[in-house]
Image: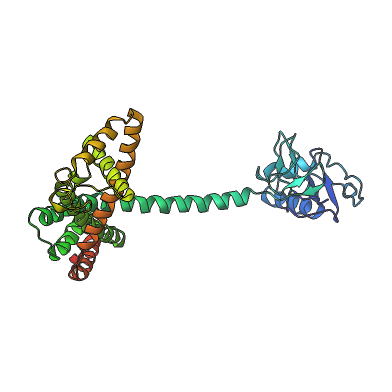
Amino acid sequence: MAKICVLCNEDCSDRPRIKNPEGQYACKACVEARQKSKSDRSAPIQPEPIDNEAFDLEPVGEPESDGVMDVLLADVPEATPAAAQGRACPACGAAMAADAIVCVSCGYNTATDTAVRTKSKNIRKEGGVADAAASVATGTLHGLVPPLIGGGIAGAIGAGAWAAIAFYWGWEVGIVAWIVGGLVGAGAFIATQGQGGTLSGVVAAILAVASIAGGKFWAVSLYFDKHIAAEFAIDDASIQQMLTDDLAMEWEAEGRDLDWKDGTDFWASEYPDQYPQELLDAGAEAFAQLTPAELQEIKDQMELGSSITEAVVKTGGFLGMWSFFDLIFVPLGLVTAFRVGAGEFES
């Protein structure tokens, strides 16, 4: 087991040494050097004589310092000796609490006479990395929020303007995409209080594309709600028509002769004007026989189908709004949004 000198912090197991009741060691060379140093600093004060016979190399036990250690340690910094209320680590000399078993400085276990790894340094290192990462993340977040808010507001205005122009006037002018890009970039840059950079430019470019696409989809939704949505409304009349259509297909499959009005057939006739009267009566009777639970189940199924159909129709209309000119003006709008958002227009 290592015996650490409290003066030089080196193992003095193989050198003459002294030991005090607290379990601290001091090698002969350090004791003599310390006493000489004290003598040089204060000539009137005579160093306490040391009995050379007190130093021993015997493996069992060390001679007591008989007060010499106290004199030597009088001007040694507090970090070197053991804490007054505890003891010194036999391995490294660091202070340990009186009831401590493992030294937190070097990991020495006094009970098993072995050293274990301590994680204090790793914890500090990992904590430092985590703090740095958190600081970077916080800075990035603070840099994102202003252009997101400013560019988002400007993008919503641009999308609304695009939708209004396309829906009310029927104009699909590619140059509007360029204008929307500049508007979003300006909103992002203003929100940064003139401190725009690459981050705000990227945010503006992404928001510009989203605003252009949002304006197109908004226009399609307005058209659908005004001209098509009524055809997908779910009410008692639509449920009765569905039941009547089911009966018509069933009867035709059975080979029944139905008298479609105006010489039409099932696929060409309009409900209810051109449907056979007996088919209309059968459909009304089937509807009247539905229980509330059955009626609600049919409504739920029809609403689901209507929602799917609406999504398909709107998606098709949205895709159909893109043209060759968008390949020119949308990239221009994206680049304009980035440059304005980043403040490059000032250079």
Lateral position of residue 151 relative to residue 290, left or right: left
As rendered, which of 329 and 146 lies closer to the eye? 329
Q: Residue at x 29, y 43 (%)?
A: 247
Q: Residue at x 22, y 39 (%)?
A: 278
Q: Residue furthest top?
A: 292
Counting from the top left corner in percent of width and height, residue 328 is at 19, 71
On screen, 64 above or below 269?
Answer: above
On screen, 294 above or below 82?
Answer: above
Q: Residue furthest left?
A: 169
Q: Quadrant of residue 186?
A: bottom left
Counting from the top left corner in percent of width and height, residue 218 is at 20, 52
Quadrant of the drawing holding the C terminus? bottom left
Counting from the top left corner in percent of width and height, residue 103 is at 72, 44
Lateral position of residue 18 relative to residue 173, left or right: right
As rendered, which of 308 and 119 lies closer to the eye? 308
Counting from the top left corner in percent of width and height, residue 165 is at 10, 56
